[in-house]
Amino acid sequence: MSGAVPAGVVVEYVEPGGDVRTVVAGAVEAVQRFLAVSADDEDARLAVVTRGEMSDTPDPATSAVWGLLRSAQAEHPGRLVIVDVSADADADADAEDGPVFEVSDRRGSIRVAREGVRFRLDDQEAEFGWDEIGAVETTPARFGRRFTVTVHLSSRRWFNAEVEAASRSELKSWPAELDKALDAYFEE
């Protein structure tokens, strides 16, 4: 995967497999080290990247890391970010020809990429190609952390999906990231 890491962001990778206790202990150590080193820098962020956690068969070790980090996020809002990439992200990265917007929570995900828009909720998935989409609408939450994307099809049907952000600050960045992907692929 390519792309520059923004200043003030520390990235830690958690690969699937391995002993659950060892992987969780490593994650705890990384979080504690980050919080100790960046105690005076409120703009610093720790991004923990897992692989395949949102797949149909998540890895027990990375699932435990997600649970740990969700708890840590509650204690340090806006400082810790959890990102999951698909198990075949390396192959996907080679095939991508532009920006990708992808957000997820424990139950679902929203992905906007070259091939179209994909919603996932639990074991249900819906994909929409750019040729069938008439409009895409977003609805950020006024008070909570829910982000809603609605796809309006040319056939006058519409479908929406919601994802909960880990923090309000994370939620605030999502509309601009989504607009970047929509501008690259969607023709009005």
Image (cartoon, rainbow, N blue to C red):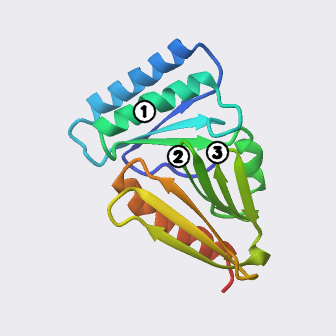
Query: From the viewer's perspective, is 153 left or right of 70?
Result: right
Label 1 crowd (10 A; few <14 / some 14-19 / many >=20) = many
Label 2 crowd (10 A; few <14 / some 14-19 / many >=20) = some
Residue with the mark numbered 2: 105
Amino acid on which the number 2 mark rests in the picture: Asp
Total residue callouts = 3
Of marks 1 and 3, which one's residue comes earlier in the chain?
Answer: 1
Nearer to us: label 2 or label 1: 2
Residue with the mark numbered 1: 69
Q: Position of residue 66 (x, y in %)?
A: 50, 32
Amino acid on which the number 1 mark rests in the picture: Leu
Q: Secondary structure at mark 3?
A: loop
Closer to the camera in the image, 153 or 88: 153
- State the separation of the CA atoms marked 2 and 1: 12 Å
Q: Position of residue 56 (x, y in %)?
A: 71, 37
State which quadrant residue 178 falls in. Answer: bottom right
Residue with the mark numbered 3: 122
